[in-house]
């Protein structure tokens, strides 16, 4: 695998031989503020990783000190409504939102504003005890604009989502874990190792099954229970056409480790 430079591109990708890619935000001098160039680079990397057959799981991190401290205010303060609209930030975040491969966010330090919204695009969030989450936009006269109001309520429920969005106050990683925003809470110095271990485990699973599980869970969240169950039944039946299904079941009977090929 390649080393991550301390300086250089605002987003750095590290490919591991075990099917895992690490995507690291790399603007430590600006607490990983989500400038437009950073978002564009992040978008391109996710587009590439989404179709890379050698990658089965992605870890998204900002490093050991901060995940991302929100949008780049210097690029927003003089923007007019039409400019903000024409930026179409949702298109930049589309490749992350629609990534077919499981994404694990490794969060240390601040995940504020856009940083919190970015973390919520991941399928699993591993957070350090010292991490904190916040939607502070109301404090500067605006509101969450990259999915914060909608994903918070889906992850935590109305009461906590309203509290976070209307007060702009941060919550601790432990509060986020109790509320259901965070998947796993660990010591700060164990965050990346835990996320990588989880990603390696997922990468060893059959990738077609992983993609179908992710797709059905996300699609089913906004559907009726009957519709979601129909999606589940069809996706499950589809997997019986895969070689991996046969390999997995035969390996179980043979008492050996399966070798999944994504076919």
Image (cartoon, rainbow, N blue to C red):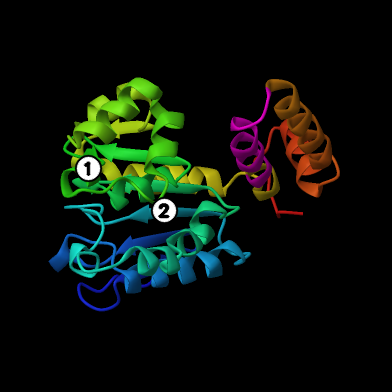
Task: From the image, tell me which residue sits under label 2.
Answer: 59
Task: Please say if 1 is above or below 240.
Answer: below
Residue 67 in sight: yes
The stretch in magenta equals: 211-224
Magenta-span inclusion, residue 73:
no
Task: From the image, tell me which residue sits under label 1.
Answer: 138
Q: With 251 as the anchor, is 52 left or right in this view?
A: left
User: Which residue is at 81% across, 48% downward?
Assistant: 243
x and y percent of residue 241 in the render? 86, 44
x and y percent of residue 192 in the render? 30, 48
Q: Which mark is residue 194?
A: none
Label 2 packing within 10 angstroms: few (<14), some (14-19), many (20+): many
Give the number of marks.
Answer: 2
Give SS at disc 2: strand
Label 1 packing within 10 angstroms: few (<14), some (14-19), many (20+): some
Task: Please say if 129 is above or below 212.
Answer: above
User: Which residue is at 41% across, 53% downward?
Assistant: 59
Most distant residue in the bottom direction: 8
User: Which residue is at 25% across, 74% downward?
Assistant: 5
């Amino acid at each position: 695998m390649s080393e991550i430079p301390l300086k250089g591109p605002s987003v750095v990708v590290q490919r591991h031989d075990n099917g895992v890619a690490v995507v690291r935000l790399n603007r430590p001098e600006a607490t990983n503020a989500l400038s437009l160039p950073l978002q564009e680079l992040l978008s391109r990397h996710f587009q590439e990783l989404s179709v890379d057959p050698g990658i089965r799981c992605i870890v998204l991190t900002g490093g050991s000190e901060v995940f991302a401290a929100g949008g780049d205010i210097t690029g927003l303060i003089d923007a007019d409504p039409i400019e903000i609209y024409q930026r179409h930030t949702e298109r930049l975040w589309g490749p992350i939102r629609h990534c077919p491969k499981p994404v694990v966010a490794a969060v240390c330090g601040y995940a504020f504003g856009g940083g919190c919204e970015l973390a919520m695009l991941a399928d699993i969030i591993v957070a350090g005890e010292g991490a904190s989450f916040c939607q502070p936009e109301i404090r500067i006269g605006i509101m969450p604009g990259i999915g914060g109001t909608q994903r918070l309520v889906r992850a935590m429920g109305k009461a906590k989502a309203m509290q976070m969005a209307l007060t702009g106050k941060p919550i601790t990683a432990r509060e986020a874990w109790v509320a259901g925003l965070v998947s796993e809470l660990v010591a700060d110095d164990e965050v990346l190792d835990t996320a990588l271990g989880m990603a390696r485990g997922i990468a060893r699973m059959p990738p077609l099954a992983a993609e179908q599980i992710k797709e059905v869970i996300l699609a089913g969240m906004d559907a009726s229970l009957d519709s979601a169950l129909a999606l589940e039944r069809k996706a499950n039946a589809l997997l019986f056409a895969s070689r991996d299904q046969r390999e997995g079941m035969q390996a179980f009977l043979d008492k050996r480790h399966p070798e999944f090929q994504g076919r």
